Image (cartoon, rainbow, N blue to C red):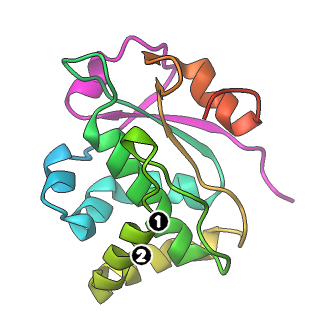
Amino acid sequence: MVPARQIHHFANLSRGILCPCPKPRMHVIRILSTRCKQHQWAQLVHDAGPELLFTLALGHIAIVHDVSERNRETRAMWQGLSWLRYACWRSWNTTPPPKEVGRGDQVLNEYWEKEWDKLPRTTRHWLRYFKQFHKDGTGLYLRSCWSRGGGRLSIDNALSTFLGKGEE
């Protein structure tokens, strides 16, 4: 029997705690924008932590809260979460990863595949550990609370992307 999909909220330290979106129970993670800027993808996977990876492997919804000083999605969210989705999919599934789109609607899959090929064996092994909890082909429900279509923070819009009713 497959358990019902649960919604888990994660605050990206440190500014994610300031997110105005309502959040019933909050877990914490640390995805650094600096890791993205410096292309430290292996370290970013480890920084995400076992709680987030386990949540994703089980097929649950993970919404990450983070805020920027500007009215836009942080790099940790638009690039870091994209990388985590790609790396987890690549490690846990036999089918090609879904299209990952970055800022400016740039498709990132080709870039992510090159970065995947450079990942150290220890990082791939760390990701593969969670494969035992993942059903092949199950989606990876990892999103920021930021709504790309409207440029605002919204839990409802983040959730609607998983339910097929909202903006992607």
Q: Nearer the viewer, residue 123 or 28?
A: 123
Mark 2 neighbour density, 10 Å: few (under 14) some (14–19) many (20 or more): some
Q: Is residue 42 above or below residue 98?
A: below
Judge whether residue 129 can be spotted in this image: yes
**Mark 1–mark 2 CB contact (< 8 Å):** yes
Q: Is residue 127 above or below residue 108?
A: below
Q: Which amino acid type corresponds to the residue marked 2 in the rendered image?
A: Glu
Query: What residue is shown with label 2?
Result: 113
Q: Which amino acid type corresponds to the residue marked 1 in the rendered image?
A: Asn
Question: Would you say 122 lies left or right of 131 here?
Answer: left
**Relative image position of residue 4 (x, y in whole percent):** 78, 44
Question: Would you say 140 lies left or right of 68 here?
Answer: right
Residue span colored magenta: 1-28
Find numbered disc 1 in the image and state the secondary structure of the residue it sits on. helix
Whether the magenta-drawn stretch holds residue 17 is answered as yes
Work out which quarter of the rendered image holds the C terminus and state it: top right
Query: What residue is shown with label 1?
Result: 109
Q: CA distance from mark 1 to mark 2?
A: 6 Å
Q: Is residue 38 above or below residue 154?
A: below
